């Protein structure tokens, strides 16, 4: 069955079945008129780049940080908003995802590709994969006899639990058959697991606040789609668990975050904290760990080594953040006691490559190196699907370099005894 037949065309709006219609704002009216549910439309950008789609103090994207470290909310609010290449790339990938999904369901949408600074074949493949995943969920809902609602880039509000102005934008929401699907697209390369993920739980909570009074939602399926890591993480939970999490975890943490209360706490959430480089709590935690460095490794027992292993990545990250902060401040004119700014090591380079090449050719030598493109470059040259079709059978992947990780890591442990037997 074609997409056009499976999802009827609705010009100028995100598709929904005949039982739902959308107006031009964001909050649903929890009422029924002549047997129809009346909703207001999502605040999607229809191919543009959305600005201000998340609240500042209790943002879903930072929920892991301010839930675990409530005072960080007020602390981060003091800093100006900045962006990075990675963040800009992710924003553009989301815009392409939105465009492809809207186009697939018959929505009129402007193609954003011409305005995307970081557009690439990889971004196209990732966005296509996300759209296909969302469409398959929609098709599955229809196969089960449902009349699904699809909302794209839907603004959701969870202020009831986290305080006024607590909102965010969910990439996609599908509602059918007593089930709500909440999708979150991640373009980064860091693996993100869905279990206990505060960001997507905020989206689910906001979606339930909007639609649970209109539809009979029994369960919520959470999906984090990470094409760059070939990772799709999903979990299905009763809606009661979402509400319980909101009352037990989110609400109390948000109250502390807004009042500036609570205790500073260090963890993986520090990676996205603007105050991380100079945070005193983080420094004290890592300096306390650093005391082990004053003992020679042979003097540490197994328990001490394990304790260090659990926290050493945080120590390294903190030291790196601190050095970067100090360097940028020094470049800006700050003087640090006992330190000075100098030029680092540099390498020689050609000032005129065409002239270099022609000069070497005149000497009868070949100035160019010829070698096979690497896998990433070759995939970019051919496109992902064509690459797999032509060269998939000519690839191999050897065992990875052994690395020590926590027991909670999902990868299987290496049997070192069996490995020793093979090598003997």
Image (spheres, grey):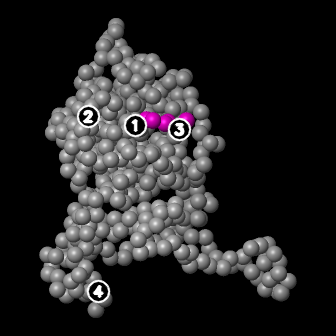
Report if the CB atoms under discs 4 and 3 are less than 8 Å apart. Answer: no
Please name the residue that numbered disc 1 is placed on: 54
Question: Is label 3 or label 1 in front?
Answer: 1
Please name the residue that numbered disc 4 is placed on: 422
Report if the CB atoms under discs 2 and 1 are less than 8 Å apart. Answer: no
Along the polypeptide, which appears first: circle 3 or circle 2?
3
Which quadrant, please, contains the C terminus? Answer: bottom left
Along the polypeptide, which appears first: circle 4 or circle 2?
2
Check residue 162 in the rendering and tell me which mark sits there, or answer none: 2
Residue at 28%, 73% in the rendered image: 404
Q: Nearer the viewer, residue 334 or 31?
A: 334
CA–CA distance between discs 3 and 1? 13 Å
Check disc 4: other Cα within 10 Å, few if <14, some if 14-19, many if 20+.
Answer: few
Please name the residue that numbered disc 3 is placed on: 49
Along the polypeptide, which appears first: circle 3 or circle 1?
3
Up the image or down, 376 lies above or below 114; here it is below
Question: Is label 4 or label 2 in front?
Answer: 2
Q: Secondary structure at mark 3?
A: loop
52 falls in the magenta region: yes
Q: Nearer the viewer, residue 275 or 243?
A: 275
Q: Which residues are magenta?
A: 48-54
Is 103 placed left or right of 16 in the picture?
Answer: right
Question: Is label 3 or label 2 in front?
Answer: 2
Q: Secondary structure at mark 1?
A: loop
15 falls in the magenta region: no
């Amino acid at each position: 069955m074609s997409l056009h037949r499976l999802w009827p065309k609705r010009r100028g709006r995100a598709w929904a079945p005949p039982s739902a219609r959308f107006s031009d704002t964001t909050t649903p009216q929890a009422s029924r008129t002549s047997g129809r549910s009346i909703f207001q439309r999502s605040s999607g950008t229809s191919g543009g780049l959305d600005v201000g789609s998340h609240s500042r103090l209790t943002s879903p994207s930072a929920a892991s940080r301010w839930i675990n470290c409530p005072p960080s909310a007020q602390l981060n609010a003091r800093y100006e908003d900045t962006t990075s290449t990675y963040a800009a790339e992710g924003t553009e990938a989301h815009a392409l995802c939105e465009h492809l999904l809207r186009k697939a369901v018959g929505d009129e949408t402007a193609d954003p590709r011409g305005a995307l600074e970081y557009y690439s074949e990889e971004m196209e493949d990732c966005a296509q994969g996300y759209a296909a995943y969302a469409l398959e969920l929609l098709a599955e809902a229809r196969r089960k006899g449902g009349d699904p609602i699809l909302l794209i880039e839907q603004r959701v509000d969870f202020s009831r639990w986290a305080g006024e102005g607590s909102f965010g934008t969910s990439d996609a929401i599908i509602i059918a058959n007593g089930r709500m699907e909440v999708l979150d697209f991640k373009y980064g390369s860091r693996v993100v697991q869905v279990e206990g993920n505060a960001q997507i739980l905020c989206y689910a909570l906001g979606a339930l606040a909007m639609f649970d009074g209109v539809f009979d939602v029994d369960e919520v399926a959470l999906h984090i789609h990470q094409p760059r890591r070939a990772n799709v993480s999903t979990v299905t939970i009763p809606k009661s668990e979402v509400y319980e999490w909101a009352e037990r975890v989110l609400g109390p943490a948000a109250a502390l975050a807004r009042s500036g209360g609570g205790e500073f706490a260090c963890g993986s959430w520090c990676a996205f904290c603007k105050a991380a480089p100079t945070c005193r709590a983080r420094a004290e935690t890592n300096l306390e760990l650093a005391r082990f460095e004053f003992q020679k490794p042979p003097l540490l027992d197994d328990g001490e080594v394990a304790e260090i292993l659990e926290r050493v990545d945080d120590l390294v990250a903190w030291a790196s953040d601190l050095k970067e902060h100090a360097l940028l401040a020094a470049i800006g004119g700050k003087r640090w006691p006992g330190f000075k700014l100098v030029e680092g090591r540099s390498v020689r380079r050609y000032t005129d490559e065409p002239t270099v090449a022609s000069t070497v050719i005149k000497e009868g030598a070949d100035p160019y190196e010829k070698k096979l493109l690497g896998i990433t470059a070759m995939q970019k040259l051919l496109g992902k699907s064509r690459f797999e079709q032509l060269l998939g059978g000519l690839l191999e992947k050897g065992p990875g370099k052994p690395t020590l990780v926590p027991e909670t890591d999902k990868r299987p442990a290496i049997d070192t005894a069996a490995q020793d037997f093979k090598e003997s």
